[in-house]
Amino acid sequence: MFVNRVEEIKAISKRLDSDNFEFFILYGRRRIGKTRLILECVREREHIYYFATESANIRHFKDHCKKSIPDMAYAADDWEAIFNLLRDRIVIIDEFPNMIKEFPGIISLFQRIIDTQLSKTRTKLILLGSSISMMGQNILSYKSPLYGRKTGVIKLGPMDFKDIRSFFPEAGWYELCEIFGLCDGVPYYLEKMRDSFWEWLQEEVSGVDSFLSYEIDFLMKYEFENFVTYKKILEAIANGKNTPVEIRNYLGMRHSDITPYLRNLMEVEFIKREIPVTEGERSRMGRYFLKDNFLSFWFRFIYPNLSGIGEKLFSVEDIREDHNAYVGRVFEQIAKQFVLELNRKKMLPFGIKKLGRWWRKGEEIDLIGMNEREKKALFMEVKWRDLKAGEADKIISKLKRKSVQTSMNGYEKHYGIIAKGTEKKGTLIFDLMDFDRVF
């Protein structure tokens, strides 16, 4: 099943329809759907698709091309000779970082091929890569020999929460929140899920070949040669250790500099650094969080129980005990996307230009939407539970008190709530029943 990615398909198709040479880069973390996307774009077009390995690529590539280009059999085992016969064709090389590992000089060689053989043709050269660090350093960096040759770049990210409903048209918003809490918007994980969320999860934790047991190690081995320390850092962050000091103490590395580890984890998009929405980028109030929900779910529920899963002593009932609290954090992410959709559809009192969390001295606000030019702000509380009668008013009063501490004096202030369910409805009070209308 292939869903959504409308804007990406439109951008790629525009390049494929061009009368000029196009050198296009499509990259993003593993499992995000790069291969499915590009093959969907060329489904009705003649093309050469090659998945690179870590050895003998020139021989494998030439053998693959011979299937559709008989004259390729007479070409020398040389990249320039091969591409001479690929002029005016669509050529897709998947996992290009594997070719770099085999022969680092391939980057300079491709630069020469583009400059001397392809730049004046209608060839479409498309490179895909899952190693975000290698794609960034070797192809997209201004130091790369290929810098300035590319005509288009797409960094493919996860799908939005509202888009995952296409995978589960029968599911309600409550279950979709649970699904998003495990799969995030990653197509590979979404396609793996069958039946209802809990039935599928029980099958996974009790099966002999559950991908949940090995998936994280698989992902980390692709990015890091020695990932033990990186894995411990992810575990620390998953357990609520969000500052460098807290992470160091959790790991017992009190006198070690973990900044390079954090930087590398951010580069491969395993973690992200957030600052209060009212702060500048250089703020020292930054906190580190896991980048996607699959990582969060795995370190929260799977990693501590790998032995129990292996011995068939673990069941989903052990997850249920703490799952509601976990989805509460996930619901804050969903609520952020909900507010962005409200903003896009002009359903808010003003146009938001910044949106994010806020914290200071033990106080937190789930979401603040700001328009600094107009001096307007929206303060939102997010609750993954059904609010009782009169509770909404108390939450708004508390929000008003906390908003004073944000130092946003002179701002026109608005207050709202996004809850799982609520008896009171208002202009800025929403629950899951509003998702159909907004999403």
Image (cartoon, rainbow, N blue to C red):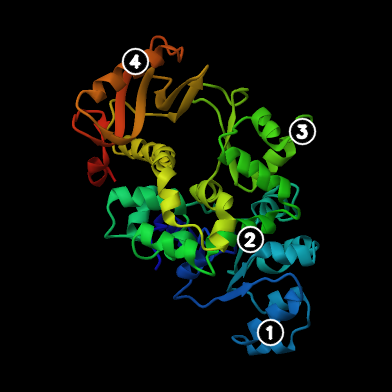
Residue 17 visible somewhere in the drawing? no
- CA gap, disc 4 to disc 3? 40 Å
- CA gap, disc 2 to disc 3? 26 Å
Q: Secondary structure at mark 2?
A: helix
Q: Amino acid at mark 1?
A: Asp
Label annotation for residue 400: 4
184 sits to left or right of 171: right
Mark 3 lies on residue = 257
- Give the number of the mark in front: 1 or 4: 4
Q: Amino acid at mark 2?
A: Phe
- CA gap, disc 2 to disc 4? 46 Å
Q: Secondary structure at mark 4?
A: helix
Q: Amino acid at mark 3?
A: Asp
- Give the number of the mark in front: 1 or 3: 3
Contact between labelled residues 2 and 1, with CB atoms less than 8 Å apart: no
Which badge, 1 or 3, is on the more N-terminal residue? Answer: 1
Residue at point 52%, 63% (across, down): 312
- CA gap, disc 1 to disc 2? 29 Å
Q: Residues within 10 Å of mark 4 (few under 14, many from 20)?
A: some
Asked if residue 394 is positioned above or below residue 157 in the image, the reply reads: above
Mark 2 lies on residue = 218
* Residue sitting nearer the eye, 79 or 416: 416
* Residue sitting nearer the eye, 91 or 36: 36
Mark 1 lies on residue = 63
Residue 382, image x and y in percent? 36, 32
Residue at point 68%, 78% (across, down): 61
